[in-house]
């Protein structure tokens, strides 16, 4: 019944009223038809019995004297006197035909179609013919000792009369339905007019016209519904204003958060630069001087024990110097500023392989592409954190780093052959306040990019990063706006 939902309320009410009227008219028509038909049948049988009894009383002498002409005239006049009489038969006590009113030969089998019972009582039998139903009335003459009279009463004229009356009833019903349809249409219009007006207002409000209001024209249920709807619209406007204010406040906080994170990253990179420079310039020079001094002292040692002690101390200081220089490079690799992102990534991957024994295969473009410095720093830091996570969490034996530089964005994919990351790993990292993955995500999102980490089809972990080459003018994440080169 879903097709009913396509109609409007007034159409549904109008249709229901019309269906009810037609149903009522059909029921009444059927009742009237059955009543008239039954009355007509009873009346035909009664008239048939009256005619048959009259003929039976008048025809006995004619039959006994074999006055066939008088018998024929009697039944002919009786038939002509009533148009519902189809035929009259007079049959003797031997069931032989004495007289009939048929113009020609009598229909075959009509004599045996209705025979008297064992008690020779008057009775009626309904016969079916090509002219319709015929009620054959049989009345005995002198209790059957002389014969019987049969009068056939046809329904043709009575049916014509009934059909004429039913036709008039149908016309009257149609007129009543038309009048009722007009009244129903007016009533449904009156009932549904405020509802349709309310629907139009609701559609307008849903389209953004929040100032629309429905007119309250009555105090009935629809009027109360309209008033409640108007109050709901007022509350909706207030709620929208509150939501807009909250959204504006949230946007401001998001902008402030982004700015603070950018400044934090910038300050972090500046601090990395400063510490790297101090480690490289001041601490490294101090250690170098210490190493030279210990070498001179070792050469001037008076015994072998002092010489060995100074030599060992010098070697330890040399190891500390190497680690210090590696730390300085790790904090801010000069190659990233001097030669670009890809050489810096290759250098880091090479040291990563040497330090942890995990093979790193890099697929990077050969041509040089100019990018902003803060994008290069962000990608380099994401690579650092991604490879570090492989060592800490995946138990992988090799990793693939794939870089693509498009017209609008640069993307990096880091994939390993470890056991893969699961949802509970993210929950554990959150509970332990580990911010490595979150830091990678923040770096990508702050530059207008995307970050995704998931378990790959082969079971390993896959990190996908994409950053637009042209980012909003927020200042470099490393505190500068200079350009760098990929390649």
Image (cartoon, rainbow, N blue to C red):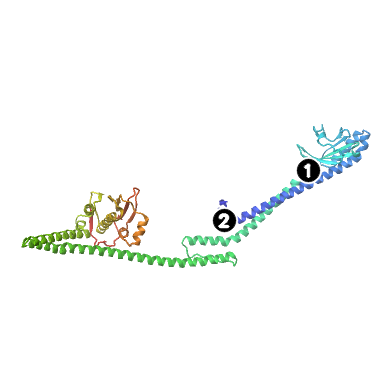
With respect to residue 142, does 240 lie above or below?
below
**Residues at discs 2 and 1 in contact (Cβ within 8 Å):** no
**Disc 2 packing (10 Å; few <14; some 14–19; many ≥20):** few
Q: CA distance from mark 2 to mark 1?
A: 49 Å
Quadrant in the rendering for residue 112: top right
Secondary structure at badge 1 equals helix
Nearer the observer: mark 2 or 1; the answer is: 2
Residue 122, horizontal then vertical, whole percent: 86, 41
Residue 469 seen: no
Residue 8's label in the rendered image is 2
Residue 446, horizontal then vertical, whole percent: 31, 60
Instruction: Give the mark nearest the N terminus, 2 or 1.
Output: 2
Q: What residue lies at 12% left-to-right and 63% top-to-bottom?
A: 290
Q: Which residue is mark 1?
A: 157
Nearest the camera: 474 or 320?
Answer: 320
Q: What residue lies at 18% left-to-right and 59% top-to-bottom?
A: 325
Residue 438's label in the rendered image is none
């Amino acid at each position: 019944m879903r097709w009913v939902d396509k109609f409007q309320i007034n159409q549904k009410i109008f249709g229901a009223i019309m269906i009810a009227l037609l149903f009522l008219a059909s029921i009444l028509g059927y009742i009237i038809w059955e009543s008239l038909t039954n009355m007509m049948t009873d009346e035909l049988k009664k008239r048939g019995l009256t005619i048959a009894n009259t003929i039976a009383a008048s025809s006995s002498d004619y039959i006994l004297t074999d006055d066939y002409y008088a018998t024929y005239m009697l039944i002919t006049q009786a038939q002509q006197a009533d148009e519902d009489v189809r035929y009259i038969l007079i049959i003797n006590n031997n069931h032989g035909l004495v007289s009939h009113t048929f113009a020609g030969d009598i229909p075959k089998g009509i004599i045996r179609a209705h025979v008297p019972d064992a008690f020779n009582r008057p009775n009626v039998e309904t016969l079916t013919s090509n002219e319709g139903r015929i009620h054959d009335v049989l009345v005995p003459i002198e209790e059957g000792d002389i014969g019987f009279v049969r009068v056939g009463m046809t329904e043709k004229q009575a049916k014509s009369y009934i059909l004429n009356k039913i036709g008039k009833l149908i016309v009257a019903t149609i007129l009543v339905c038309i009048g009722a349809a007009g009244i129903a249409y007016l009533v449904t219009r009156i009932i549904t007019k405020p509802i349709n007006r309310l629907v139009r207002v609701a559609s307008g409000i849903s389209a953004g016209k929040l100032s629309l209001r429905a007119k309250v024209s009555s105090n009935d249920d629809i009027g109360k519904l309209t008033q409640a709807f108007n109050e709901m619209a007022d509350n909706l406007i207030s709620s929208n204003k509150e939501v807009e204010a909250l959204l504006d406040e949230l946007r401001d906080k998001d902008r402030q958060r982004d700015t603070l994170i950018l400044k934090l990253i910038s300050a972090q990179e500046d601090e990395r630069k400063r510490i790297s420079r101090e480690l490289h310039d001041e601490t490294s020079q101090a250690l170098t001087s210490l190493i030279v001094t210990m070498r001179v002292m070792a050469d001037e040692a008076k015994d072998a024990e002092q010489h060995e002690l100074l030599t060992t101390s010098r070697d330890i200081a040399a190891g500390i110097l190497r680690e210090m220089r590696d730390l300085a490079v790790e904090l801010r690799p000069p190659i990233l500023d001097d030669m670009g992102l890809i050489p810096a990534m290759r250098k880091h991957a090479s040291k990563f392989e040497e330090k942890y024994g995990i093979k790193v295969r890099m697929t990077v473009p050969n041509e040089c592409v100019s990018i902003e410095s803060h994008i290069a720093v962000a990608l380099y830091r994401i690579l650092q954190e991604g490879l570090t996570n492989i060592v800490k969490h995946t138990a992988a034996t090799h990793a693939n780093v794939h870089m693509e530089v498009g017209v609008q964005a640069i993307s990096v994919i880091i994939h390993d052959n470890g056991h893969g990351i699961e949802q509970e790993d993210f929950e554990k990292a959150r509970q332990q306040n580990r911010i490595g993955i979150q830091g990678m995500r923040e770096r990508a999102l702050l530059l207008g990019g995307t970050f995704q980490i998931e378990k790959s089809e082969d079971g390993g972990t896959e990190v996908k990063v994409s950053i637009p080459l042209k980012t909003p003018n927020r200042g470099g994440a490393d505190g500068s706006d200079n350009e760098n080169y990929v390649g």
